[in-house]
Amino acid sequence: MGLFGYKESKVEDGLRRSTRAVLIGGLFHQDHAEKFKLNKEATAWLYTEMLAQLIYCIGIVFNHKICGKKSWATPEFMENCIKKEIEIYEKEINQHPGSIMSFIFKRLYEIENMSPQERANLEHIKESAKRIKKIDPKTNITSLEEIFAIKTREFSQMLLERF
């Protein structure tokens, strides 16, 4: 058992704090996206794709470390905790309700629909880079794939140590 143990309220708090860290740019901020010198739309897509990739890491670690260890520790529990935090964040920043959540969860469901082998081959990361390239043709796909891989690996490691 990690820092959060297996107490429901502590795991919920850990999931929500992890989600909040992603949303506020604690791991990848809008300023980081701007350093890639993409056009404005592609920069926004880079940032939102990174949000989805990092939230996906939360799910992977939850499923690996906690899911099924207690009756309440289900994928639905995890999803509800993440959704609650996104809803709160959307209100705080005066974002249209559901706008961030709909993008993130649409992307998460797309990733989940990939085969385990595709995910192991990081096809979800490659797909994110390709989406950005479609918006801004001068995009360096390799550098985007690298930043997605680095940030998701760093965050996953942090989560594994804490959960």
Image (cartoon, grey):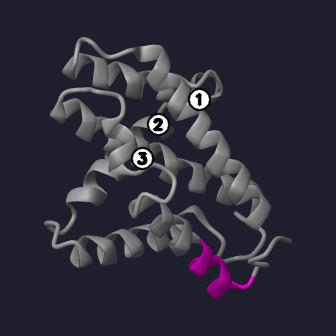
- Residue appearing at x 63%, y 87% in the figure: 9
- Residue appearing at x 70%, y 56% in the figure: 158
* Residue at disc 3, secondary structure: helix
Q: As shown in the figure, which amino acid type bears the numbered disc 3? A: Ala
Quarter where residue 62 is shown: bottom right
Q: Which image quadrant: the N terminus?
A: bottom right
9 shown above or below 90: below
Disc assigned to residue 57: none
53 shown above or below 88: above
Percent position (x, y) of residue 98?
22, 64
Q: As shown in the figure, which amino acid type bears the numbered disc 1? A: Arg
Q: Which image quadrant: the C terminus?
A: bottom right
Q: Is residue 163 visible?
A: no
Upstream in sequence: badge 3 or badge 1: 3
Which residue is identified by label 1?
Answer: 119
Q: As shown in the figure, which amino acid type bears the numbered disc 2? A: Ile
Q: Label 3 vs label 2: CA separation?
A: 10 Å
Q: Label 2 vs label 1: CA separation?
A: 7 Å
- Disc 2 crowd, CA 10 A, few/some/many (<14, 14-19, 20+): many
Q: Is residue 87 visible?
A: yes
29 shown above or below 16: above
- Circle 2/circle 1 CB separation < 8 Å: yes
Which residue is identified by label 3?
Answer: 52
Image position of 139 (left or right of 66): left
Residue range of the region highlighted in magenta in the rendering: 7-14
